[in-house]
Image: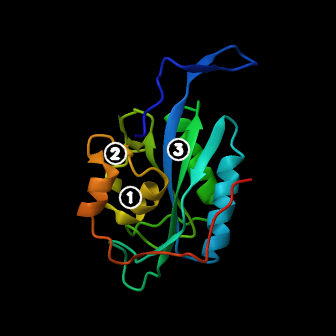
Amino acid sequence: MTETPNPNIVDTDSLTGEMHPIRRVVLALGSNLGERMATLQGAVEALADTPDFFVTGVSPVYETDPVDAPDGSGPYLNAVLLADTTLPAARLMERALAVEDAFERERSEVRNAPRTLDVDLIVVGDRRSNEDFLRLPHPRAHQRAFVLQPWHDLEPDAVFPEHGPIAELLDAADATGVRRREDLSLEVG
């Protein structure tokens, strides 16, 4: 079972002596514009290069039909990344946005518009947030097979906070249009 690291277990910053809890992080990656696979690989590398962020797993790659997207939107490549970190959730969100910007993500007024890269924080330990800038756990991920399936591949007994086991959520989600790409894989390091 996936467990949130004990917030009483800390990592000590060797420069400042500050102590920070180690949190388990689940991130979802997606791309449906440009060189999708190269973009996902670049995002994994950029995230892995983040100080105090330790990638512990990368899921298989899935090709998925766009969900609630404008007409004419192309298919996505999606993956999930697991990590342990001492970074605060707000700093992780800033890093996710910076990685998106590095891959020329254009923000649009159109909801779910096509994008070169989407990096979503799904879960950050047991952290809860309902701010415009940061919603944790992710408010719709528990319904999205393109997040649940790759996460399930990494942690079949994981539990989505406030919603239950991801295996059960995946059974209830519409997984049509979610296809594993055996010919593609992401590497860390």
The answer to whether residue 163 is visible is: yes
Camera-near label (3 vs 1) is 1
Q: Residue at x 41, y 52 (%)?
A: 156
Residue 124 appears at what percent x and percent y?
46, 38
Q: Residue furthest top?
A: 17
Q: Mark 3 Cα within 10 Å, few/some/many (few <14, many 20+)?
A: some
Residue 41 appears at what percent x and percent y?
66, 64
N-term-proximal mark, 3 vs 2: 3
As helix, strand or loop, the secondary structure at mark 1 comes to: helix
The residue that mark 2 highlights is: 160
Q: Which amino acid type corresponds to the residue marked 3 in the rendered image?
A: Met
Which quarter of the picture shows residue 4? top left
Q: Residue furthest bottom?
A: 72
Q: How is the image coloured?
A: rainbow
Q: Which amino acid type corresponds to the residue marked 1 in the rendered image?
A: Leu
The residue that mark 3 highlights is: 93
As helix, strand or loop, the secondary structure at mark 3 comes to: helix
The answer to whether residue 103 is visible is: no
Which quarter of the picture shows residue 175? bottom left
Q: Mark 1 Cα within 10 Å, few/some/many (few <14, many 20+)?
A: many
151 over 52 or under it: above or below: below
Q: Residue at x 58, y 50 (%)?
A: 57
Q: Are marks 3 and 1 in contact (CB under 8 Å)?
A: no
Mark 3 and mark 1: Cα distance apart in space: 20 Å
N-term-proximal mark, 3 vs 1: 3
Q: Are marks 2 and 1 in contact (CB under 8 Å)?
A: yes
Q: Which amino acid type corresponds to the residue marked 2 in the rendered image?
A: Phe
N-term-proximal mark, 2 vs 1: 1
Residue 38 appears at what percent x and percent y?
68, 70
Identify the disc placed on residue 148: 1
Q: Is residue 155 left or right of residue 181?
A: left
